[in-house]
């Protein structure tokens, strides 16, 4: 049978929308104005881009309930528009729960997906009204039974994936043979297991990885049913990719392929299906405006020092293993040269890129960096006494 992917990639008329490339949410003119008004470094979050992503997912995955993974970016400029659009939210800590409450979400619109919680994390979120949690190991069971006995649980499974940049099953998820015994053990402790979840890994470039994970989930689902455990919820996690230096499949094509896999694996069952996109939802809805604050020639190579770096919004380069594209004004009309771009701290490892071709930049000139929404400011610090980039929301 032809898949959604085959059809799209082979149909000429569709090629323009098959891939999604990194596009800034502001023009250079707008960036100049905003930097003038708010200073730099500045993160600009576009509500229009966020709604475009959310609606693309909803249309291509009909019937799926979306819980935005707040871990990717818990800023109000992301959380509030999603709340207003009717999205739900995935939190991993009490801090993320408080950010979601502040943006308007109620506890019944939340799922807590940390498989290994401190008692403090569990009891704070439980006391605030959260009732959906996940677990992946036997040591979590007595903790849940003691402090949150009446919650709904999802068992997190480890799944294999081949095209993800970040493998999240390396740290979390029950192995296939342990899955049903863990559900039985939880039930014996008086807990209610309502479903299963998995995560194919973040920046998962091929939707085919979902298809393999879903088949594995279906095998375990049937074994649970045979053991007398009636499950209702399947949570396929996050993993949807975003464009950085390389393009990725468009959300529409990617999600239609995922929808087809869901139909093939779970279409015959009355299952409530939920997804927890983080990166795929918010990454390309935020652009960074950063300024050249210094310039020197070292060993024949030009070094630019900019006002944001690895300890700030570019922290994703360390923790998320992403290389961001840097855009200069009218770069296509100016000769470009290899250069090094480094961050503002006194740490010599604070280098944003050594492999960038840029025009001869003036001190004070702006660079715009698209796809700065996910795992960027969320993991930034104030190292060296420097302020983190301010974030503003635009329409
Ligand atoms: C990080 C995470 C997500 C979001 O993953 P993305 O790859 O950013 O979409 C979703 N669910 C869980 C449990 C996570 O840990």
Image (cartoon, rainbow, N blue to C red):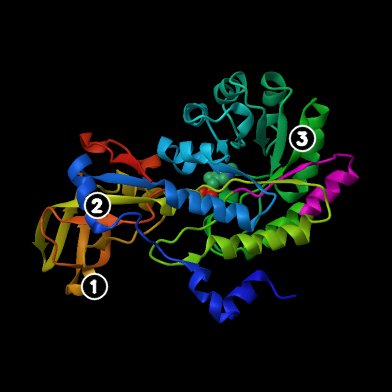
Mark sitting earlier along the chain (2/1): 2
Mark sitting earlier along the chain (3/2): 2
Q: Label 2's element?
A: helix
Residue receiving disc 2: 31
Please state the horizontal and vertical placement of residue 135, each as a whole percent of the image: 67, 36
**Quarter of the image with the N terminus in it:** bottom right
Of 49 and 160, nearer the camera is: 49
Crowd band around label 2 with a 10 angstrom C-alpha radius: few (<14), some (14–19), many (20+): many
Q: Is residue 73 left or right of residue 131?
A: left
Distance (Cα) linking label 1 and label 3: 56 Å
Q: Is residue 255 above or below residue 142?
A: below
Residue 162 visible within the image: no
Of 285 and 232, nearer the camera is: 285
Distance (Cα) linking label 2 and label 1: 18 Å
Q: Nearer the viewer, mark 1 or mark 3?
A: 1
Q: Nearer the viewer, mark 3 or mark 2?
A: 2
Residue 226 is a magenta residue: yes
Mark sitting earlier along the chain (1/3): 3
Residue 144 visible within the image: yes
Asked if disc 2 and disc 1 are in contact, CB closer than 8 Å, the reply is: no
Q: Quadrant of residue 90?
A: top right
Residue 193 numbered mark, or none: 3
For the residue with label 1, is its CB less than 8 Å from the closest atom of ligand 1?
A: no
Q: Is residue 170 left or right of residue 248?
A: right
Residue 332 numbered mark, or none: 1
Q: Label 1's element?
A: helix
Q: Identify the residue at horizontal 79%, vertical 50% (top origin).
A: 220
Q: Is residue 156 left or right of residue 34?
A: right
| Span highlighted in magenta in the image | 218-237
């Amino acid at each position: 049978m032809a898949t959604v992917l085959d059809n799209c990639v082979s149909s000429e008329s569709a090629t323009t929308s098959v891939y999604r490339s990194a596009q800034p949410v502001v023009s250079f003119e707008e960036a100049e104005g905003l930097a003038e008004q708010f200073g730099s470094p500045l993160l600009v979050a576009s509500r229009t881009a966020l709604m475009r992503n959310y609606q693309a997912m909803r249309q291509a995955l009909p019937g799926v309930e979306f819980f935005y993974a707040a871990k990717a970016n818990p800023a109000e400029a992301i959380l509030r528009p999603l709340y207003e659009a009717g999205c739900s939210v995935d939190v991993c800590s009490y801090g993320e729960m408080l950010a979601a409450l502040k943006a308007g979400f109620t506890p019944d619109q939340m799922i807590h997906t940390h498989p290994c919680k401190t008692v403090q994390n569990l009891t704070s979120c439980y006391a605030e009204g959260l009732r959906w949690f996940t677990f992946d190991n036997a040591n979590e069971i007595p903790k849940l039974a003691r402090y949150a006995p009446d919650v709904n649980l999802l068992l997190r499974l480890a799944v294999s994936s081949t095209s993800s940049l970040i493998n999240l099953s390396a740290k979390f998820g029950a192995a296939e043979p342990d899955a049903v015994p863990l559900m039985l053990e939880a039930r014996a402790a008086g807990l209610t297991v309502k479903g299963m979840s998995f995560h194919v890994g973040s920046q998962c470039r091929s939707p085919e990885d979902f298809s393999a994970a879903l088949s594995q989930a279906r095998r375990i689902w049937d074994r649970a049913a045979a053991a007398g455990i009636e499950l209702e919820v399947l949570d396929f996690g996050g993993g949807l990719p975003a464009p950085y230096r390389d393009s990725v499949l468009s959300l529409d094509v990617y999600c239609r392929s995922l929808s087809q896999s869901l139909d093939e694996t779970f279409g015959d069952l009355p299952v409530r299906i939920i997804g927890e996109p983080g990166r795929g939802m918010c990454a390309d809805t935020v652009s960074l405006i950063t300024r050249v604050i210094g310039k020197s020639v070292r060993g024949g190579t030009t070094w630019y020092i900019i006002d944001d770096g690895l300890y700030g919004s570019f922290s994703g380069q360390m923790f998320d293993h992403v290389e961001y594209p840097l855009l200069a004004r009218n770069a296509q009309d100016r000769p470009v040269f290899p250069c090094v771009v480094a961050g503002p701290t006194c740490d010599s490892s604070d280098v944003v890129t050594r492999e960038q071709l840029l025009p001869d930049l003036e001190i004070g000139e702006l660079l715009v960096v698209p796809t700065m929404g996910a795992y960027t400011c969320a993991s930034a610090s104030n190292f060296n006494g420097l302020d983190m980039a301010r974030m503003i929301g635009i329409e």
